[in-house]
Amino acid sequence: MTASGIGWYGVALAIIGGALRVSTPYLFVSLGEVLTEKSGRVNLGLEGILLMGAMTGFAVGSLSGSPWLGVLAAGGAGALLGLLHAGICNLPRVNDIAVGIALFLFGMGLAFYLGKPFIAPRAAMLPALQLGAWSNEPAVRAALEISPLFLIGIALAIALRWGLANTRWGLVLRMAGESADAARALGYSVNAIRTLATMCGGFLGGIGGAFLSLYYPGNWNEGLSSGQGLMAIALVIFARWNPLRCLWASLLFGGASALGPALQTVGVTSGYYLYSAAPYVLTLALLVYSSSTRHTLAGAPSELSISR
Amino acid sequence: MRSGELYSSTRRDVLIRGANLVAAGALLGPLGSLARAADAKPIKVGFLYSASRDDYGFNQSFAVAAKRIAKMPGVSVEEQERVPETAQCERVMESMIQVDGCKGIVATSFGYWPFVLKLAAKYPDVLFIHGGALWKDGDPKNAIGYRGYMEEPHYLCGIAAGRMTKTGKLGFIGSKPLYFIFNNCNGFVLGARSVRPDATCRVVITGDWDNPVKEAQAVNALADQGVDVIIADVDGPKVSIETAERRGIYSCGYHTDLSALAPKGFLTGAEWNWAKAGDFIHAWQTGGKYPNLLRGGFKDGMVAISPFGKAVPENVRQEVLKAQQGFVDDTLKLYKGPLKDNEGKQVLAAGQTVSNTDNDYKVNVKWLVEGAIGETGLK
């Protein structure tokens, strides 16, 4: 508690800190969705998966006392919901978009129902790495308090980027997404690939939820996700199905979400609704920019129901 | 165990028992008061909440009252959570009345009001109590609206904050840009500046009743600016209080007792006291009088402050309690001149005061007092 009048420098710090703190769920959900969509399916149910992950993570964390066990359980819950999505979509003539919306509402309802007893209790939080320990400015130290999950997310983004381009399973996954017939001709089961990819995507989405309930803001309640799962899906298109770009986009969205509160603390209060809408305006602008009537989105897997 | 089971006897039993008690009361003279208490007709009261009742927020403040009301003689309580402010709440209320036999309904959430009005006309033998003072002349007489003046406990929180702050910078997080949020903010700043004239308060409006991520961002951004005491006027201040505790700064609560969330940094908090509904229910049971519209502060026991956190030293506690007594005696006025808004305009001249019960004045507060950094955007 030092008396520091850091003003606009503080705004910049709050935005950087906000980006580092808030981006993790976006990152995990969007990486999960990249995996799923690369296999040729869209899972719009990630908001529901995020909430189920948040609830499961918090519940297991508070019952077992181990937040890391909570993270694993959250991933498991997400994978199960992913399996449900894939299982239904594997049936002939089922629309994955419609199933996704159903899963979104189902996951949300289930999380609210099962999460009822966990609104009041508190759980042990995930530990943080103090990367700002060198500074004696408390604001800097707070901004550079990084969750290990964020670092895992970065590593994952790099690994996915490399893996999709350079490994055999990356090739098979992309093939299922680009041309199901080619994959079948080579003897792969397209449904099995997509099921696995959707489950992995659900696992990552669940971990994103656990970050919300076990690290930041670190609580389970029903307003927790406030649409972040849906935003993350838009973010995938924004990032053109590129895991590394997902990382930058997540940071951008996280920073944008800190803009409103940070500006208000220095007295810039007019139009705070507009600042709050910043991430959404960003999404809309990019979708308009990248849309075209003549060709599909660059980088979009051609088996996706939205690009066919 | 629900206390209602104790009263599940038939109407005839009740009449006989009542008659016996009245007779006994007449015979025993001095025990007459006992007979009067038992005169109260058994009543079942249904509580509706818009979200979970243990949300460390608005709903919990009502659930605390429900618990107290359930202990009243002849009163049993049933509760339903997560009732949306749509036609759904009408169905829930009707089923409480028709299926469960409730003769009292406590509709806690603001948006239930239109449905309360509709049902109050349909069921004149049921008392409807609503946690928003919206009743006006011409509305059914079996409906009651009540609400506390929260700016008064905010003033007391402000005193504690003003005494405890080292940097002189306070933070106020508000949900929606509405008059009562700004009155609360003004109360908080006025209280702080009454003991620390150079204190300032940064005002952050999140724009949502409930948005934990934004609230946490706000607390962090405030702490980054050197703010060392925050208060969060949002639906569930749990996240704000916990984030403040993690940042090592002080916090004040809102709605209900949040002291458990911040063992180190909690100062005190502004609380509702909805238990006043017990008086209405008692009046309804016994055929007594009740108001249809009740607003009040400390003087009417409609608001309270949370138990002090251990960080608050004895002299500050005494100072806060003294100011509370000032509200009870009506010697302390929240808005009194000379008073400027934060754009330097004079709001009240020296010697001018606004009565603490002047609700019309408070509803039209579209400015923040001097010392608040921010604007209402309401002009």
Image (cartoon, coloured by chain):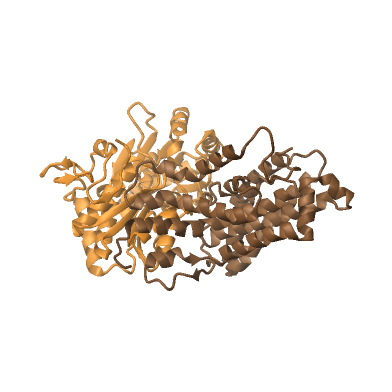
Residue B18 visible somewhere in the drawing:
yes
**Picture residue at 66% right of the left edge, 51% below the top:** A33
Colour orange, chain: B
Left or right, residue B375 beside residue B341:
right
**Picture residue at 60% right of the left edge, 46% below the top:** A238
Question: B287 or A206, which lies in front?
Answer: A206
Q: Where is residue B64 in the image (x, y as percent from the top left)?
A: 42, 53
Outermost bottom residue: A134
Q: Quadrant of residue B292?
A: top left
Question: A201 or A164, which lies in front?
Answer: A164
Q: Quadrant of residue B251?
A: bottom left
Q: Is residue A232 above or below residue A148?
A: above
Rendered shade, chain A: brown
Q: Position of residue B11 (x, y in %)?
A: 51, 40
Q: Is residue A2 above or below residue A288?
A: below
Q: Quadrant of the N terminus of chain A?
A: bottom left
Residue B151 visible somewhere in the drawing:
no
Q: In this view, does B378 lie above or below B317?
A: above
Left or right, residue B171 beside residue B331:
right
Left or right, residue B15 beside residue B268:
right
Outermost top residue: B138
Q: Position of residue A195 (x, y in %)?
A: 77, 52
Q: Quadrant of the C terminus of chain A?
A: top right
Marks counted in the figure total 0
